[in-house]
């Protein structure tokens, strides 16, 4: 079982956009209003869920993103110490910024229910060579942004 590393690079999960105090105030006001409305309808579980979700969102927004080490091997893509083999990848595509200001992204759909969609920044590595190697092992299809991706972008994540 050879794990020869063909390409290796590092990248962050997402670009960190520091939030100002107004963003946190708006989140708090919306959460309190939602929890109050849920309480008026005697839906206390929803009220608690709204508060917990708002606190979780605030903590996630304050935390800087983790930096991961990516390695493309003969068997698949390693993210940290976790190997995603080519056999479990359904399709891939590369996403490029039209203006060229952002690094290209590698979008991979897998059959894993824990991580069905991987989006990996290709910064600090030859994106064309990574694309060519993936093309030999995985089918290329167009990937569209899902609702969760659009919501995260709208929230600034």
Image (cartoon, helix red, strand yellow):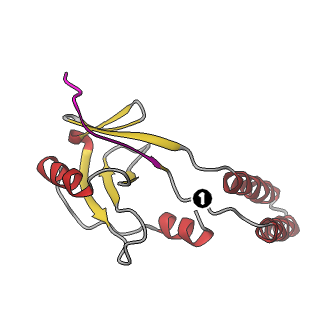
The part of the image, by quadrant, that contains residue 79 is: top left
> Which part of the image, by quadrant, shows the C terminus?
bottom right
In magenta stretch: residue 101: no
Q: Position of residue 148 (x, y in %)?
A: 51, 64
| Quarter of the rendering containing residue 140 | bottom left
Q: Residues within 10 Å of mark 1 (few under 14, many from 20)?
A: some
What kind of element bears circle 1?
loop
Residue in the foreground of this view, choosing between 60 and 103? 103
- Magenta stretch mostly in which secondary structure? strand
Quarter placement of the N terminus = top left
Label count reads 1
Residue 8 lies within the magenta run: yes
Q: Position of 14 compared to 134: left or right?
A: right
Check the image and report above or below for 151 versus 46.
Answer: below
Horizontal relation, residue 27 to residue 116: left or right: right
Q: What residue do we see at 85% from left, 66% from top?
A: 32
The residue that label 1 is drawn on is 16
Q: Position of residue 41 (x, y in %)?
A: 83, 68
Q: Residue 60: horizontal and vertical position, in percent? A: 67, 52
- Foreground of the two, 38 or 122: 122
Q: Residue at x 35, y 77 (%)?
A: 98
| 149 sits to left or right of 73 | right
User: Which residue is most to the left?
Assistant: 136
State the extent of the magenta-drawn residues as a range: 1-11
Q: Residue furthest bottom?
A: 99
> Residue 49: percent from the left, percent from the top?
74, 55
Position of 24 with respect to 72 (left or right) is right
Position of residue 81 relative to residue 95, above or below, is: above
Give the residue drawn at x 54%, y 59%. 15
């Amino acid at each position: 079982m050879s794990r020869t590393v063909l390409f290796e690079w590092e990248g962050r999960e997402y670009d960190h956009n520091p939030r100002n105090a107004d963003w946190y105030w708006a989140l708090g006001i919306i959460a309190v209003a939602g929890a109050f409305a849920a309480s008026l309808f005697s839906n206390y579980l929803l009220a608690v869920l709204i508060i917990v979700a708002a606190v979780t969102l605030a903590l996630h927004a304050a935390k800087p993103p983790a930096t991961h080490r990516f390695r493309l091997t003969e068997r698949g893509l390693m993210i940290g110490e976790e190997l995603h083999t080519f056999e479990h990848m359904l399709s891939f595509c590369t996403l490029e910024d039209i203006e060229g200001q952002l690094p290209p992204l590698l979008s991979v759909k897998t059959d894993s229910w824990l991580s069905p969609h991987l989006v990996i920044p290709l910064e600090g590595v030859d994106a064309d060579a990574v694309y060519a190697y993936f093309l030999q092992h995985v089918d290329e299809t167009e990937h569209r942004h899902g609702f969760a991706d659009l919501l995260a972008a709208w929230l600034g994540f």
